[in-house]
Image (spheres, rainbow, N blue to C red):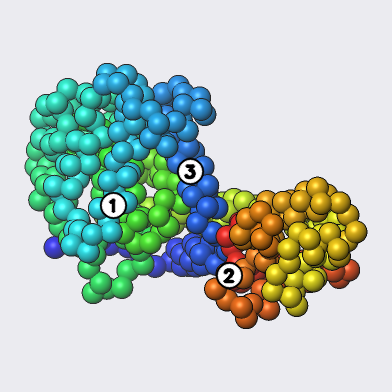
């Protein structure tokens, strides 16, 4: 049975705590489905751009967006095909990991490798582990030179590890809960073994990224695609690869060989994870703040007649256009423009049609004659004299707007 060796240092503990704090704050953000979709789409574009940079493929942001949204499927043999394959493989991963019977295995590794390289390399090169006589194909693999050179320097036929059997042990160990190892450390251990062994004839680099996506999604760190794995590897490629190459390098005979001890590697990996998770938290925070500012402007930028109507609807279930004309003394067309503007801002909803049309405050329903006065008071409070300070105070509350996020 695979059993990694490492010590739990102060640095590792700090990095894990930082990861968990950032993750908790991300999960506490008031993300509506539409805002979450926007952030995930943006992360998808960044992932494709980062992967292209990792694999030395030149594309622009528009092409990256088309690939990430599935609007473009590159033809076999083109440099962009591996990017399209990665996008499709991620869809497969997010679907597969929701299956309660899903399990990690060497066959999963082989399947990921095949999905990623179909139409990219010769068929005999993908979907199989390499033997001791096989060389690594360095095409679309910017890590291959450094890693395989260091691996060859310390490996021989007497030290050869059979990949399928070895990763059967490693991947069986990953879901094991006997020793209560933190999920970041477990991902780090599996990643380290993949980098050490470089088990495929072709596509090691991108297959490692794909398996990291699997492990992140399986442990909840991916947050359904919010965490940009390819960007993480691009950002910290030097730290991750240099650290592994150093641990693979032959040690002087007078020095004790501690290459099986993963403590130093896990310190580096957990620090990179903590930094990326903090960056992601700040990016999502800015996205939420931007939406909040748009919403504040939409609510506060009202004319006095519209403000009067919202105050009226706090205590009255509905209002017609004729009633609004009588309340404000404006023409029917001005009333139509005022009311239509409030509907577009999603502050009120329109019901009926023609002369029988009427309006209710957003958050109420046609079936409910007893309206949700708490929700109405929040909207009306915002447009009163002390509304702006009230809204500012509410933004410091983690549950801000969670009761009505439909327009965020």
Residue under the point 90% across and 59% down? 329
Crowdedness of circle 1 by 10 Å Cα count: few (<14), some, many (20+)? few
Question: Residue 86 is drawn in which quadrant?
Answer: top left
Q: Is residue 153 visible?
A: no
Residue under the point 18% across and 42% down? 111
User: Could you say where residue 349 lies in the image, as x and y percent from the top left?
Assistant: 64, 60
> Where does label 2 land, which residue?
365
How far separated are the C-alphas under marks 2 and 3? 32 Å
How far separated are the C-alphas under marks 1 and 2? 35 Å
Image height of 408 relative to 146, above or below: below
* Labels 3 and 1: the sequence-earlier one: 3
Residue under the point 38% across and 40% down? 241
Q: Which residue is nearer to you in this view: 175 or 47? A: 47
> Where does label 1 land, which residue?
95
Report if the CB atoms under discs 1 and 2 are less than 8 Å apart. Answer: no
Question: Residue 210 is drawn in which quadrant?
Answer: top left
> Where does label 3 land, which residue?
41
Q: Which residue is nearer to you in this view: 254 or 387? A: 387
- In this rendering, the label closer to the viewer, 2 or 3: 2
The secondary element bearing badge 1 is classed as: helix
Image height of 78 relative to 388, above or below: above
The secondary element bearing badge 3 is classed as: helix
How far separated are the C-alphas under marks 3 and 1? 17 Å
Crowdedness of circle 3 by 10 Å Cα count: few (<14), some, many (20+)? some
User: Could you say where residue 169 lies in the image, as x and y percent from the top left?
Assistant: 15, 57
Residue under the point 58% across and 53% down? 284
Crowdedness of circle 2 by 10 Å Cα count: few (<14), some, many (20+)? some
Q: Which residue is nearer to you in this view: 69 or 113? A: 69
């Amino acid at each position: 049975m695979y059993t990694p060796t490492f010590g739990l240092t102060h640095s590792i503990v700090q990095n894990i705590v930082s990861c968990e704090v950032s993750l908790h704050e991300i999960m506490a953000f008031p993300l509506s489905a539409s805002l979450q979709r926007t952030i995930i789409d943006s992360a998808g574009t960044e992932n494709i751009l980062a992967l292209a940079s990792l694999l030395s493929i030149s594309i622009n942001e528009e092409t990256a967006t088309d690939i990430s949204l599935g609007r473009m499927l590159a033809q076999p043999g083109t440099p962009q095909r591996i990017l399209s394959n990665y996008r499709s493989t991620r869809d497969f991963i997010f679907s597969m990991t929701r299956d309660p019977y899903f399990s990690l295995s060497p066959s999963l590794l082989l399947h990921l490798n095949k999905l990623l390289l179909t139409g990219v390399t010769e068929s005999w090169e993908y979907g199989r582990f390499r033997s001791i006589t096989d060389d690594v194909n360095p095409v679309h693999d910017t890590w291959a030179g450094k890693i395989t050179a260091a691996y060859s320097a310390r490996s021989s036929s007497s030290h050869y590890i059979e990949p399928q059997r070895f990763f059967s042990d490693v991947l069986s160990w990953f879901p094991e809960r006997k020793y209560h190892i933190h999920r970041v450390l477990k991902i780090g251990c599996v990643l380290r073994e993949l980098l050490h062994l470089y088990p495929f004839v072709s596509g090691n680099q991108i297959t490692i990224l794909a398996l990291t996506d699997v492990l992140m999604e399986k442990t909840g760190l991916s947050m359904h695609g919010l965490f940009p794995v390819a960007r993480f590897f691009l950002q910290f490629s030097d730290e991750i690869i240099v650290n592994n190459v150093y641990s693979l390098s032959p040690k002087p005979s007078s020095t004790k060989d501690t290459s099986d001890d993963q403590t130093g590697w896990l310190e580096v990996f957990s620090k990179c994870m903590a930094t990326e998770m903090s960056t992601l938290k700040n990016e999502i925070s800015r996205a939420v703040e931007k939406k909040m500012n748009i919403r504040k402007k939409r609510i506060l930028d009202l004319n006095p007649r519209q403000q009067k109507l919202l105050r009226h609807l706090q205590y009255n279930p509905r209002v017609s256009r004729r009633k609004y004309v009588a309340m404000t003394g404006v023409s029917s067309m001005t009333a139509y423009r005022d009311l239509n503007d409030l509907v577009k801002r999603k502050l009120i909803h329109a019901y009926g049609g023609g002369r029988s049309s009427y309006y209710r405050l957003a958050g109420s329903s046609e079936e409910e004659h007893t309206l949700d006065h708490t929700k109405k008071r929040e909207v009306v409070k915002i447009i009163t004299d002390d509304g702006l300070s009230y809204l500012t105070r509410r933004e410091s509350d983690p549950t801000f707007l969670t009761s009505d996020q439909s327009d965020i």
